[in-house]
Image (cartoon, rainbow, N blue to C red):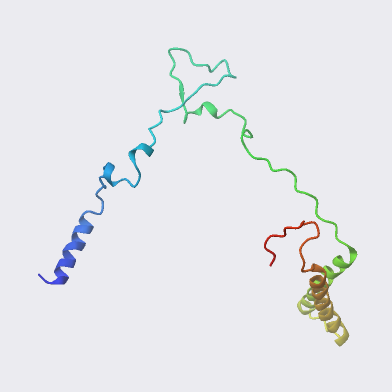
Amino acid sequence: MTPQSDEDEVWRQIVASFNDTAELDAADQPWPDSENLPAEPPRRVIKQSDEAHRPRPEEPLAEAGDDADEDDDDDEGHYVPPPPPPLPKTDTATKIAWLALFGGPAYLLLSAALNWRLQGWMLFTAVAAFIGGFVALVVRMGDGPPNDSGWDDGAVI
C-alpha cells in the first residue's frame, strides 16, 4: 500500500464515523466523579397569592415551564439603574473653546455646501478658530494627577 492510499482510507473512516456519537465513560472525563452534580428533579411552582389557582389534591402541581407565572408582574426582578449624576458645570472659556473647535469647520462645510464665496479673512478666521479651540482645550486639559487622589496615586501614566 502506498502512503496516499493509507491516507485515503483514514479519511474514509473519519467521514464514515462523522455522525456517530461519542461514548464517554468515567475514565474519559476531565474531572473526578465526586465533582459531578446530581440531576435536579423538576421544580414545582405553587402560587400562594392566588387562591383560585391553588392546586387541589387531584390536580397535578404546575411544572416550572408551565404558564403559571405569566400573570406575575413583569417588573419583578428587573434592574432599574439609579438616575445618572448631573453633568459637570463648565466655565465660559471651555464653552467658547468647544464652540470654536466645532464652529470653524462647520462654517467651512456650510459655505462649501452652499457655494458661498469666502473672503480671505473669513477663511483665516474659521481655520484659526478651529486651531485655537483645539489648543485651548488641550492646554486646559492638564496632565497631572487629580488633586484629591491622596498620597498613593497608583500607576500614573
Q: Quadrant of residue 115?
A: bottom right
- How many numbered discs sit on the rendered protein? 0
Q: Foreground residue, 108 or 95?
A: 95
State left or right for residue 83 relative to residue 19: right
Looking at the image, residue 113 lies above or below residue 83: below
Compared to residue 85, the image places residue 13 above or below, namely below
Name the image quarter holding residue 135. bottom right
Quadrant containing the N terminus in the rendered view: bottom left
**Would residue 68 be found to the left or right of residue 112 on screen?**
left
Which residue occupies 75% across, 45% down? 83
Position of 150 with respect to 45 (left or right) is: right
Asked which quadrant contains residue 26, the reply is top left
**Could you tell me residue 28's position as x and y percent?**
28, 46
* Percent position of residue 120, x then y: 86, 87
Nearer to me, 94 or 62? 94
> Vertically, is 91 above or below 68?
below
Q: Residue 99 appears at what percent x and percent y?
A: 84, 69
Q: Residue at x 75, y 48 (%)?
A: 84
Location of the C terminus by quadrant is bottom right
